[in-house]
Image: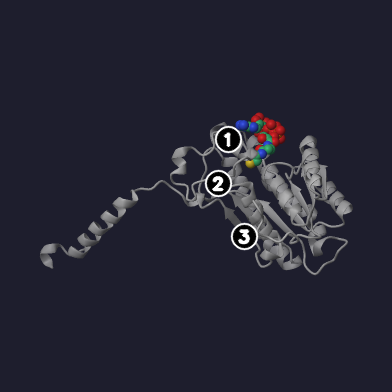
Amino acid sequence: MESPFKADILKGKVALITGGGSGIGFELSTQFGKHGASIAIMGRRKQVLDDAVSALRLIGIPAIGFEGDVRKQEDAARVVESTDKHFGSIDILVNAAAGNFLVPAEDLSPNGFRTVMDIDSVGTFTMCHEALKYLKKGGLGKRSSSGGTILNISATLHYTAAWYQIHVSAAKAAVDAITRNLALEWGTDYDIRVNGIAPGPIGDTPGMRKLDPEEINSKARDYMPLFKLGEKWDIAMAALYLVSDAGKFVNGTTMIVDGGLWLSRPRDLPKDSVKQLSRVVEKRSRDSPVGLPKSKM
Ligand code: COA
């Protein structure tokens, strides 16, 4: 699908994207690149990085991959430094690296819980922390008038509760807290905007393949507001809005991009019956107001 944004909205910007070699992260790498940004991808798997970088370069996007694990502070420090050295600045940091698997809470070991907290929450903080000196004033070399921006990929699981996802719910709740607190502190001190996106189920992603191998079952589709899975493109367009000047006054928000799914629940009444029933109830309450038995009126 064509982007509704101008092709130069990220011209001259450098984006470092963790987990940018696959899934939603790779779509962000591609769309940011198509809108003018140079792309550095951080990931653990060399083959995934190499393939992603080749694909980006093939369509003319300046790209480089750096192997690293967001759980290791020394990897985070090395990758932000290498990105700045290679491209001359870091203007946009996207924390898209995440870990996930389905498991009932009673079967999840504390180490399994910690592993996802380490990747999603501590990893996000570590990357932000290590990137700060580059994000201030749009990179060490540049010293532009405003700072860079951070985008954290979150989820909607923790807004209510999610089956077999206690570790990810806890981790993403922490990510949202990181987004708001950094937006407050770094927005005030350095003009760095920090926002998030909470995607719903997005088709053709590793997350979807892991968490819902059969995809959304047909029963759930009956009450999904927009009645379909999202596309990686949907997340990338929201991301472009948030990291470009289009979102220059948006700070500390986590934008839900899920077609309204997190609000959904099965209907308690069919639509036709509700009209009928509501008239009957209206009539009954008019005829017999609360507290006044009909005989007293
Ligand atoms: N069910 C229950 N526990 C699990 C599990 C599962 N499916 N997968 C891993 N764990 C537990 C392990 O048992 C281990 O705990 P233990 O030491 O108490 O046994 C702990 O988690 C760490 O597992 P390990 O395999 O050593 O972690 P890893 O660092 O190699 O991998 C994961 C991290 C588990 C998050 C892995 O799924 C991953 O790398 N994911 C990244 C990609 C991804 O998930 N993308 C989707 C994003 S939505």
Q: Element type at marker 2?
A: helix
The answer to whether 218 is drawn above or below residue 245 in the figure is above
Of the numbered discs 2 and 1, the one sitting upstream in the chain is 1
Res. 253 mark: 3
Q: Which mark is residue 157?
A: 2
Coordinates of residue 203 in the picture (x, y in percent): 59, 42
Q: Quadrant of ligand 1?
A: top right
Residue 68: x and y in percent read: 80, 41
Beta carbon at label 1 within 8 Å of ligand 1: yes
- Tell me: residue 165, above or below residue 236: above
Q: Depth check: 102 or 281 in front? A: 281
Q: Quadrant of the C terminus?
A: bottom left
x, y (%) of residue 42?
A: 78, 44
In-image side of 233 versus 161 (left or right): right
Residue 65 in picture, x, y percent from top left: 82, 44
Looking at this view, name the residue that lies furthest to the bottom.
145
Crowd tier of the residue under label 1, counting other residues whose Cα lies within 10 Å: few below 14, some 14–19, many 20 or above: some
Q: Secondary structure at mark 3?
A: loop
In what element is the residue under mark 1? loop
Query: What's the amino acid at mark 1?
Result: Leu
Amino acid type indicated by mark 3: Thr
Residue where numbered disc 1 is placed: 102
Occupied quadrant, residue 188:
bottom right
Q: Amino acid at mark 2?
A: Leu
